[in-house]
Amino acid sequence: NERSVGWGPLVVGDIRDRDALKRAMETHRPTAVIHFAALAYVGESVREPAEYYSTNVTGTIAVLDAARACSVANIIFSSSCATYGVPEALPVRETSSQNPISPYGRSKLMGEQIIGDYASAYGMKFAILRYFNACGADPDGELGEWHSPETHLVPRVLMAASGIIDAIEVFGTDYDTSDGTCVRDYIHVTDLARAHLKALMHLEGGGQSLAVNLGTGRGVSIKEIVKAVGRMTSRPVPAVFRSRRPGDPAELYADPGAAREQLGFVPELSDVDTIVRTAAPFFGLKTRPMKLPPARAATSVAARRVRDSGGDSSRAGQTR
């Protein structure tokens, strides 16, 4: 997605090519590496494990080798809640057992372990960030969903609402949850971006290596997502209900406490309405105007009055 990189130099290459990575680092002299690059479809990883281990594991080793050769000591790694597999207890904590059930999850866990080994042996520091369900889009409307094929829930529900696909498929309606559908922890991509910046500042400010979950601690069901899209867009959302998929846990949500305590990170945009509102325009959908809570509405009115008074707060309450 070259069109998405508009704020700095772009070097196109293969994440497994350590020589190309080394040349890029020698040219740009980074103080840290944020390693996002990976294949990330669970189902595809079952069909094509060789590609996943090659890209996600060999690619991570190449990044680490290039960073080490260029004396880049700080590594921020995009990991996943898939490293936990089916959780033994909820919420999922960083101390929970990591027993991934897919090659994708195993490749991410291997990446975490390799990074830990490099850090111990070569004096590197790391921040491992385990995403839960990333979703939403840039609130400014510049960057949004751009996957092919699209498999993520929120965009597929929006695709069903816009008529791009005939219906959203819902796998399983008999789970032990409030409405029978799977419950997941959805976190807005802008919140994820903020978490990476906080991790970068933590490491470069002398902080120690860490591994934290990035989630909200709130579970939302598939039916709740479908209803939210229908309510926000005033569109029907056709749905087809199918049997469960093997390996899908009924519920999966994070304990976000460690990220809050160690990084000062608290999600700000990860409520369902904001997620839908920011993602909908990328599928040609308009959403209902946002109704601010009373406190935020009062703040908004006060700010508008100050602006209209030419920035003079002493005149903001006067009738004009």
Image: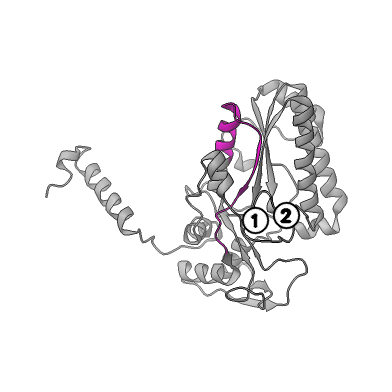
Q: Which residue is at 61% across, 55% downward?
A: 254
Please check the rendered image and state whether residue 202 is part of the magenta-colored stretch, yes or no.
yes
Secondary element at image label 2 = helix
* Residue that numbered label 1 is attached to: 92
Give neighbour class at mark 2: few <14, some 14-19, many 20+ (Cα, 10 Å).
Answer: many
Color encoding of the figure: one colour
Query: Quadrant location of residue 217?
Result: bottom right
Cα distance, mark 2 to mark 1?
A: 8 Å
Mark 2 is on which residue type?
A: Tyr
Identity of the residue furthest to the right in this view: 50
Mark 2 or mark 1: whose residue is earlier in sequence? 2
Give neighbour class at mark 1: few <14, some 14-19, many 20+ (Cα, 10 Å).
Answer: many
Q: Quadrant of the N terminus?
A: top right
Is 109 placed left or right of 201 in the picture? right
Residue 84's disc is 2
Q: Position of residue 246 (x, y in %)?
A: 78, 69
Q: Say above or below: 267 vs 65.
A: below
Q: Which residue is at 76% across, 66% downward?
A: 247
Mark 1 is on which residue type?
A: Val
Q: Which residue is at 81% across, 42% downward?
A: 57
Q: Say above or below: 246 vs 212.
A: below
Please check the rendered image and state whether residue 162 is part of the magenta-colored stretch, yes or no.
no
Q: Say above or below: 274 vs 250.
A: above
Q: Say above or below: 82 vs 70.
A: below
Query: Quadrant location of residue 242?
Result: bottom right
Residue 178 showing in the rendered view: yes
Residue 14 showing in the rendered view: no
Determine contact: label 2, label 1, CB under 8 Å. yes
**Magenta-colored span:** 196-219
